[in-house]
Amino acid sequence: MNTGNHERRDLTLLIFIIPIGIFLIVIVGQMAVRLVPIWSVNADMHSNLEPNVGSARPFALLEPILPQILTPMAWAESYLTPGAEISFPPFLSFEPSATPSAPSAAATTETPTASATPVPTGTSATASVTPPTSSSICEDANALNYGDSLPCDYPSTSPPPTTCTDPLANNQGQALPCTYPPPPPVCPGANNPNGPLPCDYGDVSTVDTGMYGTPVSPLPAEIAVGGPPDNVTAELADETYIVISLRVRVESIPDNNYDLVLYEYNNSEIVYLDRVVVGISKVNTGSYYEVFNWGNPDRDTNTNVDTADLVASADCPTNTECDDRHFNNNPASPAEPGNPNSLYNGTGILIDVDTASSSPPPGDYDFVYIFSPSGGSAGGTHVDAVQTVEVPTPPTP
């Protein structure tokens, strides 16, 4: 009985000891050689080298695992990083070309020297220039002999062009010399657009003492300035004039609007348009730009009283701009032959100052001159009101 018990106990010990021994052998062997193909090595560089397990690699049963075992064994190849490609950034190394030395006491500034060989006209195709350098090799990449011995050789200047290459010229791509458009006018819109200064903007009139040399002052109270007509009119005697403080703007580009309106007297639904001259001025010094002249042989095309059907009539048999010309200001009644219904608000003469024949320069004009010229029917000039407006001009037929 005792012998049998000892034998069973010994077999039990063997059963436990043999597997434990095999396990310990495996652990010891793993320290010498790598049995498992998936592994990593800590290179003590704050990162691990991980193999690419998906890449193809030679099969080896036993491969070294310790970093110092890098030499392949006779029966296998060793890969520190199997299947991976390692790339390194380019390394730059700098080597001094000369040993620096302390400057001499007499030297204060370093002056580079350059030698240049002039090229005679029509002979040499290259020019030699020696740039400042500390070596005997031409280091200018633009030189013809870059990398060769000094001096550096450069291409000669290209021959001068024979055609105009300026895109702003009129004859770009054609034979020289370049030609250019004329310069912009010195005085745009003036009678002397290209100068000389001062600019001549047209007929700048002064008060003619022979025709209307007597100013009327103060301004008659019957004249409404800036307001609508009320048919309470003032009559200016022949050869007199008034100056009204009223701002009128002349646009640099005509805005196709009437800018100023002069209201006449409503005489039982008929206006007998008197001879009258209207001017504008920036200063009240006796000079003005004429913007309307009823009675002048030249037509005023910048007003609503100059229409296609303004023809000779019974009251104006020879001059369409005669004194006391009839205008029917009742739109409900037909116009008389030769006398159209064309007045603004019944009695208003509209004036486009932008297109006046005197060509006033752009800007604000603070004074309006109204003249009663001589040569009328001795009835003077009737003025009801003067007002600035923005009324569209009719389209040109």
Image (cartoon, helix red, strand yellow):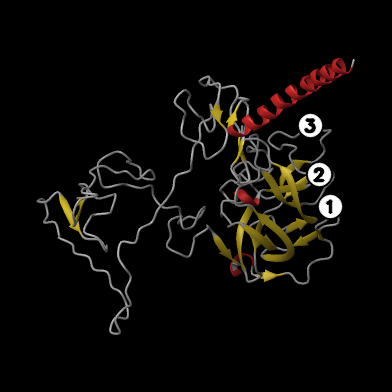
Per the image, the residue denoted by label 3 is 334
Identify residue type, mark 1. Pro
Residue positioned 65% across, 32% down in the render:
28
Amino acid type, mark 2: Asn
**Label 2 to label 3: alpha-carbon separation:** 16 Å
Q: Secondary structure at mark 2?
A: loop
Q: Earlier in the sequence, mark 2 or mark 3?
A: 3
Q: Which corner quadrant of the image does residue 17 belong to? A: top right
> Which residue has dot 1 on it?
228
Between 78 and 107, which is closer to the camera in this rendering?
78
Q: Residue drawn at (67%, 54%), measured in percent from left and top?
A: 275
The quarter of the rendered structure image containing the N terminus is: top right
Dot 1 lies on which element?
A: loop
How far apart, in angstroms, are the residues tagged by discs 2 and 1? 9 Å
- Residue 2 against residue 262 in the figure, above or below: above
* Image location of residue 6, percent across then percent down: 84, 20
Up the image or down, 20 lies above or below 314; here it is above
- Percent of width and height locating residue 128: 17, 56
Residue under label 2? 345
Q: Would you say residue 373 is visible in this rendering? A: no
